[in-house]
Image: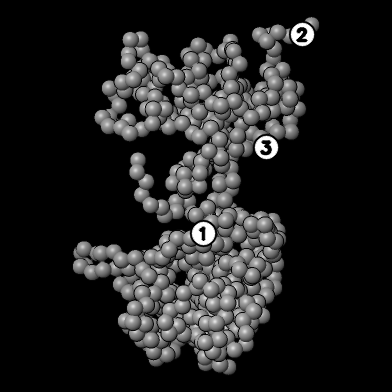
């Protein structure tokens, strides 16, 4: 004899994991409006101006919530304590036979956000999401109290609830919680988008909190970021590096050719600059006797915004006494290959459709050879500004060249236009001109070059390192040259930092240092096209609310 709808057991319930119908929206009356009340007028309990300028749907949702509160329901209690997570429930019972669950009826208590709702007469299904994943909920009217059924009937997508019940599997094997008790934990006044693709890119960046609710991929990106930073810390600790913290506000900006942000300290009556790099402070610590130091730091540069640049970004910088840049290349290979293996389970990855590998060893090529062998520049472009300018124009006729542009500046343009994008597999570019490296040690073999490398992967600079300059006279001369460039109008020229020169005069041991772009590294590991995809709250123009 076939079973009727009313006399089915919970294990006869069909799987409701198919795509849900559009979530219920508030009724024009706002849901639960007391008789005779004008639904168009907001409840008096809402603060004046709270609903000003909001779309009608949001006003209705907020008014509905206010009426629920006016009716005696606490919309924001802090008394429910979940004892389990959806991930743990799936791990524990995902493979369990449904007959065994029906017999044992294990009780579980979870909390999370309602992401879908589907009503079937006297039954209702919800999809609950917590930090570990999702779980289907099931309520049946004749199995719960009238008060609980009324509460469940008035819930909206986005509400956060706490539920208790027993775990079972539907006829098609969907793991489900048969709810025996439910509490409203947080009332949502602003509805979630019905689907993730309804959020455009700008909305995802501005309302990252909604993006994280709607998109498992976005949550995965930031889980990868967290694991990446954790792995970097553990690796540096295993190599004997001490994690330190240096100032974020500097009296003199230094450590990079970059335009700083300026702020004002009222008590000291002086301007300060947000950190463009921690380099000069970290090297002061080498003077002080620390042998290996590192810092995972936020830097601020008043520059343009692109898929590779954000004015606020994260770097890891580390410095090691009695080391040179070649030793750091070996260390970097070990660090990145181990990082990829730990975070992704493999050294092979695909970034935006291009295959690459973090397996050591990485390719090594000099700056001049990269210009000719990879960039296709004629040999004379290595020594002639005129030849370099002609080649830049052949690459991009629209490229504007500054009057009197020097050889190094033109070579940088060649590198940007013809070399960088072709460096897909990890490549160390070495032996940069001294003019381009004001803080790097001169090469013993050729004083016109420095002991420096930059690491490129998938057309992006990931790391920059060099053997450190510890000759105070040479450092002073290079600072003075940079200061002269500033006086001539180069806003990114470095300042003359006399205190740093004084620190070098006390004696800094020979050393090597490196900066690793954490954001760009996470972009590679998470296959994210833009740096904004891996920064929780990227810088945006103000949004009118």
User: Alpha-carbon distance for marks 1 and 2?
Assistant: 61 Å
* x and y percentages locating residue 276 in the rendered image: 40, 69
In the picture of the structure, the residue carrying the numbered disc 1 is 307
Above or below residue 261? Residue 219 is above
Q: What kind of element bears circle 2?
A: loop
* x and y percentages locating residue 359 in the rendered image: 70, 67
The image's mark for residue 91 is: 3
Tally the marks: 3
Q: First in sequence, mark 3 or 2: give its number.
A: 2
Q: Is residue 474 visible?
A: yes
* x and y percentages locating residue 261 in the rendered image: 34, 65
Q: Residue at x 41, y 72 (%)?
A: 258
Identify the image quadrant of the N terminus: top right
Q: Residue at x 45, y 60 (%)?
A: 305
Q: Looking at the rendering, which quadrant does residue 387 occupy?
A: bottom right
User: Alpha-carbon distance for marks 3 and 2?
Assistant: 34 Å
Choose between 516 and 371: the one closer to the eye: 371
415 with respect to 543 (left or right): right
Identify the image quadrant of the C terminus: top left
Residues tagged 1 and 3 counted as in contact (Cβ below 8 A): no
Q: Is residue 292 visible?
A: no
Q: Residue at x 31, y 81 (%)?
A: 487
Query: Which residue appears farthest toward the top when viewing the image?
Result: 1
Above or below residue 476? Residue 48 is above
In the picture of the structure, the residue carrying the numbered disc 2 is 2
Of discs 1 and 2, which sits in the foreground?
A: 1
Q: What kind of element bears circle 1?
A: loop
Above or below residue 120? Residue 134 is below
Of discs 1 and 3, which sits in the foreground?
A: 1
Q: Residue at x 52, y 76 (%)?
A: 413
């Amino acid at each position: 004899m076939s079973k009727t709808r009313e006399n089915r057991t919970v294990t006869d319930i069909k799987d409701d994991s198919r795509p849900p119908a559009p979530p219920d929206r508030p009724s024009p009356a706002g849901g639960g409006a007391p008789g005779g009340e004008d639904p168009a007028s907001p409840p008096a309990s809402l603060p004046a101006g709270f609903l000003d300028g909001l779309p009608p749907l949001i006003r209705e949702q907020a008014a509905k919530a206010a009426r629920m509160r006016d009716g005696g329901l606490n919309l924001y209690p802090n008394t429910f304590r979940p004892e389990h997570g959806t991930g743990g429930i799936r791990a524990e019972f995902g493979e369990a036979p449904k007959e065994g669950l029906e017999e044992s009826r294990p009780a579980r208590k979870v909390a999370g956000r309602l992401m879908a709702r589907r009503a079937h007469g006297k039954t209702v299904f919800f999809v609950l999401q917590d930090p570990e994943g999702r779980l289907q909920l099931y309520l049946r009217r004749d199995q719960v109290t009238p008060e609980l059924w009324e509460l469940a009937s008035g819930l909206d997508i986005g509400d956060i609830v706490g539920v208790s019940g027993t775990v079972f599997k539907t006829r098609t094997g969907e793991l489900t919680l048969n709810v025996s008790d439910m509490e409203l934990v947080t009332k949502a006044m602003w509805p979630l988008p019905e689907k993730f693709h309804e959020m455009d890119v700008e909305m995802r960046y501005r309302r990252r909190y909604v993006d994280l609710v709607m998109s498992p991929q976005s949550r995965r990106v930031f889980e990868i970021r967290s694991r990446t930073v954790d792995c970097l810390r553990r690796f540096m600790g295993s190599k004997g590096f001490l994690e330190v913290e240096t100032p974020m506000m500097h009296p003199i900006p230094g450590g990079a050719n970059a335009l700083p942000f300026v702020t004002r300290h009222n008590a000291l009556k002086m301007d300060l600059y947000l950190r463009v790099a921690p380099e000069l402070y970290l090297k002061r610590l080498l003077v002080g006797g620390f042998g290996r130091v590192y810092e995972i730091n936020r830097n601020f540069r008043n520059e343009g915004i692109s898929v590779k640049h954000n004015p606020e970004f994260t770097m890891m910088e580390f410095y090691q006494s009695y080391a040179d840049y070649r030793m750091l290349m070996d260390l970097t290979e070990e660090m990145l290959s181990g990082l990829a293996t730990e975070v992704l389970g493999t050294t092979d990855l695909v970034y935006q459709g291009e295959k690459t590998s973090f397996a050591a060893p990485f390719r090594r090529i000099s700056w001049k050879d990269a210009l000719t062998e990879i960039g296709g520049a004629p040999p004379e472009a290595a020594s002639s500004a005129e030849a370099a300018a002609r080649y830049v124009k052949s690459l991009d006729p629209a490229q504007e060249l500054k009057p009197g542009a020097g050889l190094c500046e033109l070579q940088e343009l060649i590198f940007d236009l013809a070399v960088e994008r072709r460096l897909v597999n990890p490549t160390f570019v070495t032996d940069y001109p001294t003019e381009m490296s004001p803080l790097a040690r001169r090469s013993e073999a050729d004083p016109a070059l420095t002991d420096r490398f930059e690491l490129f992967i998938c057309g992006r600079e990931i790391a920059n390192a060099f053997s450190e300059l510890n000759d105070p006279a040479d450092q002073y001369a290079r600072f003075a040259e940079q200061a002269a460039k500033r006086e001539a109008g180069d806003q990114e020229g470095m300042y003359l930092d006399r205190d740093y020169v004084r620190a070098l005069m006390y004696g800094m041991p020979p050393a090597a240092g490196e900066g690793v772009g954490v954001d760009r590294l996470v972009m590679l590991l998470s296959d994210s096209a833009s740096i904004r995809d891996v920064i929780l709250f990227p810088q945006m123009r103000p949004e009118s609310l």
